Amino acid sequence: DMGTVSGGLNSQLDWNLDLNTSYAPVRGFTPSVAYGATQDGVHLRGRVDKDFSPHWHGSYGLQNIPGKYSPVDFVHDSTITLSAGRHTIQASAAYDRQMLKSPLTGAISYTLTTRPVTLHALMDGSQYALAAQSGRKSLAATLGRPNEEGQRSSQVELRFGQVAATMKKEGSSKPRIRLSKDAVL
């Protein structure tokens, strides 16, 4: 088994083709590699995953941006997850020198899974988010952190199956409401 091949083409004729391959564990670490190409060049993504205990899981990934092959341009990311019954806490961090303002980013999230509903909370460098999901119904709210002018963005989405109503507000502008329906092709 060589892996899974995936690809895509969008309306601007941007394309990608990837081969995702997982390998046998080595000393408890499970490596995987994605080999790919886009119109901008070749890219490679390596990842190792490890279950440290029945409740602790960690991963580390390293990738190049298509067409950029210098080690200083590599993007690093890592995640550590603690799961205990219905509760999950996850902390993640990424380092990308192309993000000039802050090349190091991080996020922390909490998930509570119960029978009628799953609750999810997230905090990262740009936003706070809360979501509740029950089957095909969900309610999600996001509040952005203030930008340089002290303005915040916010969004609320209510979804029933394939139908969604979204209210989005950017800074001091008037809220925009969007109704949408997903289509399966």
Image: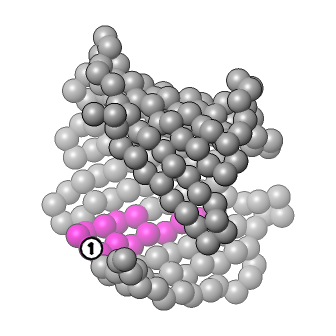
The residue lying at 56 percent from left, 87 percent from top is 177
Quadrant assignment, res 71? top right
Q: Which residue is mark 1?
A: 136
Q: Nearer the viewer, residue 125 or 64?
A: 64
In the image, taking residue 173 as reference, residue 134 lies left or right, namely left
Q: Is residue 134 magenta?
A: yes
**x 61%, y 72%: residue:** 11
Vertical order, 153 against 74 (above or below): below
Q: Which residues are magenta?
A: 131-144
Q: Residue at x 31, y 11 (%)?
A: 27
Q: Is residue 52 visible?
A: no
Question: Viewer-proximal residue, 96 or 10?
Answer: 10
Quarter of the picture holding the C terminus:
bottom left
Q: Position of residue 116 (x, y in %)?
A: 18, 66
Under circle 1, the secondary element is loop
Q: Which residue, as the protein is rendered here, is positioned at the far left?
A: 115
Q: Main secondary structure of the magenta part?
A: strand
Q: Position of residue 139 (x, y in %)?
A: 39, 73
Which amino acid lies under the numbered mark 1 shown in the image of this protein?
Answer: Arg
Q: Is residue 6 above or below residue 14?
A: above
